[in-house]
Amino acid sequence: QVQLVESGGGVVQTGGSLRLSCAVSATSAAIKSANWYRQIPGTHREWITSITSTGGTTYKDSVKDRFEFIRDDAKKTVFLQMDRLTPEDTAIYYCLVFMTEGPPYDLQGQGIQVTVSS
């Protein structure tokens, strides 16, 4: 059964860094593209960054120059490197991965908590 596992969340102080990862396993398909979202309880889930099949990236303005979307196709893993974190970055983070073949054609992570203390 195809699986996607998120990891890397936790608690960090303001100004610190975290790296989130989403790893796909049990499939011969490759990752085509992916997105990261985050959600503060009681609010809507917001998009924060995307990566295309050719490695092109786009970012929400509030995370641009602080977050970096990285992909490792050999390991079928995508990463969200988060630097200079602030308390406003505290949220549950989700990845959404689109596969080159399916089903499943897309996989969503289970969500991972990131807490930035002031």
Image (cartoon, helix red, strand yellow):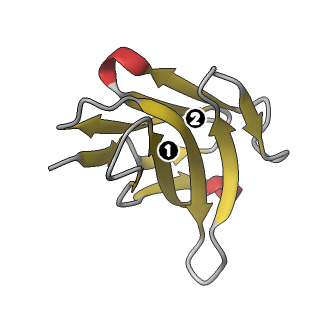
Three-letter residue code for mark 2: Gly
- Measuring 62% from the left and 69% from the top, which residue is drawn there? 45
| Tags 1 and 2 touching, CB below 8 Å | yes
Frontmost residue, 26 versus 117: 26
Three-letter residue code for mark 1: Val
Residue 77 shows up from this direction:
yes
Q: Which residue is mark 2?
A: 16
Q: Is residue 13 left or right of residue 73?
A: right
Q: Is residue 97 left or right of residue 90?
A: left
Image quadrant of residue 29? top left
Tell me if mark 2 has few (under 14), some (14-19) or many (20+) residues whose alpha carbon lies within 10 angstroms of its own: some
- Measuring 17% from the left and 37% from the top, which residue is drawn there? 26
Residue 52 is situated, as x and y percent measured from the top left of the image, at 64, 31
Q: Is residue 99 left or right of residue 91?
A: left
Residue 42 is situated, as x and y percent measured from the top left of the image, at 60, 84
Mark 1: which secondary structure?
strand
Image quadrant of residue 69? top right
Find the residue positioned furthest to the bottom. 42
Residue 86 shows up from this direction:
no
Q: Which mark is residue 110?
A: none
Tell me if mark 1 has few (under 14), some (14-19) or many (20+) residues whose alpha carbon lies within 10 angstroms of its own: some
Mark 2: which secondary structure?
loop
- Measuring 63% from the left and 20% from the top, which residue is drawn there? 54
Residue 50 is situated, as x and y percent measured from the top left of the image, at 66, 40
- Measuring 41% from the left and 19% from the top, which residue is drawn there? 73
Q: Which residue is mark 1?
A: 12
Up-down relation of residue 74 to residue 36 (above or below): above
Q: CA distance from mark 1 to mark 2?
A: 6 Å
Quarter of the image with the C terminus is bottom right
